[in-house]
Image (cartoon, grey):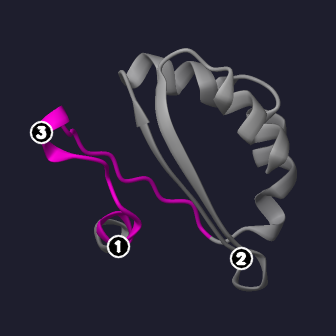
């Protein structure tokens, strides 16, 4: 997680991020805000994220993605809303 945090901190296009890790239940999640889809796709394709996700795949549960658009007047996204959307 620390390598991905460092990668996120130095990535163009990321506005903010939060990580959720529950290893005993194989539950991992990222809540992030990006300037656009292109910035997110570029991050996902680069190491260390790409390699870590491949290495962790056997220890993780099923992967799902939820994306939605927000504007500045919406405020910051919050975990309760994100987890609700994920369900």
Residue sitting at x 48%, y 37%: 16
Indicate the secondary structure of the residue bearing disc 2: loop
Magenta stretch holds residue 69: yes
Number of numbered labels in the structure image: 3
The x, y position of residue 3, in whole percent, is: 84, 39
Tag 3: Cα neighbours inside 10 Å, few (<14), some, or many (≥20)? few
Disc nearer the start of the sequence (1/3): 3
Q: Which residues are magenta?
A: 62-83
Whether 31 is drawn above or below 46: the answer is below
* Majority secondary structure in the magenta region: loop
Give the image quarter of residue 34.
top left
Whether 8 is drawn above or below 46: the answer is below
Indicate the secondary structure of the residue bearing disc 1: helix
Give the image quarter of residue 27.
bottom right
Q: CA distance from mark 1 to mark 3?
A: 19 Å
* Residue receiving disc 3: 73
Q: Disc 1 vs disc 3: which is toward the camera? A: 3
Q: CA distance from mark 2 to mark 3?
A: 34 Å
- Compared across the picture, whether 83 is left or right of 21 comes to left
- Compared across the picture, whether 86 is left or right of 58 comes to left
Residue sitting at x 75%, y 39%: 4
Disc nearer the start of the sequence (2/1): 2
- Compared across the picture, whether 30 is left or right of 65 comes to right
Indicate the secondary structure of the residue bearing disc 3: helix
* Residue receiving disc 2: 26
Q: CA distance from mark 2 to mark 1?
A: 19 Å
- Compared across the picture, whether 68 is left or right of 47 comes to left
What number is the disc on residue 80? Answer: 1
Whether 33 is drawn above or below 28: the answer is above
């Amino acid at each position: 997680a620390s390598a991905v945090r460092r990668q996120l901190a130095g990535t163009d296009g990321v506005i903010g991020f939060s990580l959720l890790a529950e290893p005993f239940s194989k539950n991992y999640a990222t809540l992030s805000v990006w300037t656009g889809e292109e910035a997110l796709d570029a991050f996902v394709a680069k190491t260390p994220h790409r390699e870590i996700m491949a290495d962790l795949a056997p220890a993780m549960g099923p992967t799902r993605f939820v994306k939605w658009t927000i504007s500045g007047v919406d405020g910051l996204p919050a975990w309760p809303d994100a987890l609700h959307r994920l369900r």
